[in-house]
Image (tube, rainbow, N blue to C red):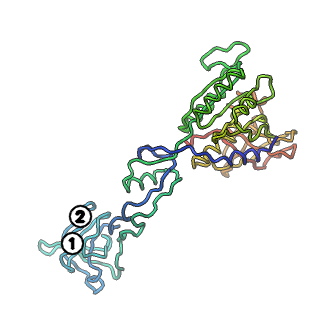
Amino acid sequence: MISVEEAKNIINSQKPNWGDRKVLLAESMGEVLAEDISADRDFPPFDRVTMDGIALSYESFHQGQREFKVQEIQLAGEPAVALKNPDYAIEIMTGAMLSKGCDLVIRYEDLEFFEEGNQKNVRIILDSAERWKNVHKQGSDLGAGELLIPEGQLITAAEVAIMATVGCDVVKVQSKPNVAIVSTGDELVDVREKPLPHQIRKSNAVAIEASLNQLRIPNKRFHLVDDKKELKEKIRTILDEFDLVLMSGGVSKGKADYLPEVLEELKVEKLFHRVAQRPGKPFWFGVNEVGKQVFAFPGNPISTYMCFRVYFMPWLMKNLKREIPMKVAILQEDVSFKPDLGYFLQIRSEISVQGHIDAFPEMGNGSGDLANLAKSDAFLYLPPGQNLYKARKSYEYYSFDISSLA
């Protein structure tokens, strides 16, 4: 039996490669880039005006000239016009290409316009200005061919905007794993069925399926009966067809808990079996010859969900470049727990007026008390080594809410 920290380290040492695929740029948000994106031209691609005002010759201004005739107006999106005479200025708008022969832009706030006959003129009410003022020089951000976004970057709205700027309408992104969710046990019936007195409905696999759907992770759910031969045949096929396997049940010490033996026969190397924790002690984890990971969670509902949330979710999101930040919460009541195990306490959390997360224990009736999950919204990890966990101490906090990752 290994510690919680050892189990996390073993899982996090696995670095899967799920390949890549191409998606439309408009559908790439939340994906991870699988290629470098480079500038197809200079950034900005021309000398870009950054303020509404006038463009003029710096030399004329430097020599003391402050009144200019307005030659014409140039808008953003129009080709650059040429300054015909250094005694003239061009009225120009933000985002426009700097007019030819100009190397200074003065904003409207520093100007006075006046008419002489039919001629529009402008007076500059500014004593000094440097050359290229209010001009974003071509290539000053990045030169053509330079790296804009590296491979491995999570795509947000910012990356979408940059890729649109360089003409990437289709983007290569990292593939997400295709996950098989496998429940085992003759006592389980489908959610839509009415169970007999000795049966229960399949809740664990459905909860995992819903969580993966929320994160847009492709998945398929299977149920296998407690027959060793059938388990072996079906799991062999599942391992061939899926990138990753999540199992619920069949890893404890019961007479029908065949999974560890079956997985070993299928050449799935056991990396650990049994973790010094409650709930979830029988947790099994391994990897096959081609690097496909198998997470086999204990069958009790709280055990399955705790192992899924504490071990699988952080590992998955880290490998999708969307790490879940570790948080802590402050225990609000003393908790007694005598076994020398890590204890994942179910809690109800509230945000204090100081902005801390306060944790209120929801003890429940053990790892089979599924109803208690509805009263809770997180797990609080109480590490081994003591019998009494005092109120006002901070501990690792694992929220049930993963909506921010979707």
Labels 2 & 1 near each other (Cβ < 8 A): no
Q: Quadrant of residue 52?
A: bottom left
Q: Is residue 138 above or below residue 356?
A: below
Q: What residue is pinned by disc 1?
A: 82
Q: Name the residue rendered at 75%, 31% in the picture.
A: 260
| Amino acid at pointer 1 | Ala
Q: Quadrant of the N terminus?
A: top right
Q: Residue at x 72, y 23 (%)?
A: 228
Residue drawn at x 71%, y 18% is 187
Q: Secondary structure at mark 1?
A: loop
Q: Secondary structure at mark 2?
A: loop
Q: Position of residue 178 (x, y in %)?
A: 56, 36
Residue at 42% x, 56% y: name it.
162
Location of residue 118 (image quadrant): bottom left
Whole-Å distance between the Cαs marked 2 and 1?
A: 10 Å
For label 2, the residue is 79
Q: Residue most toward the top?
A: 196
Quadrant for the C terminus, please: top right
Image coords of residue 379 (percent x, y): 72, 40
Q: The disc labelled 2 sits on which kind of residue?
A: Pro
Q: Nearer the viewer, residue 76 or 281?
A: 281
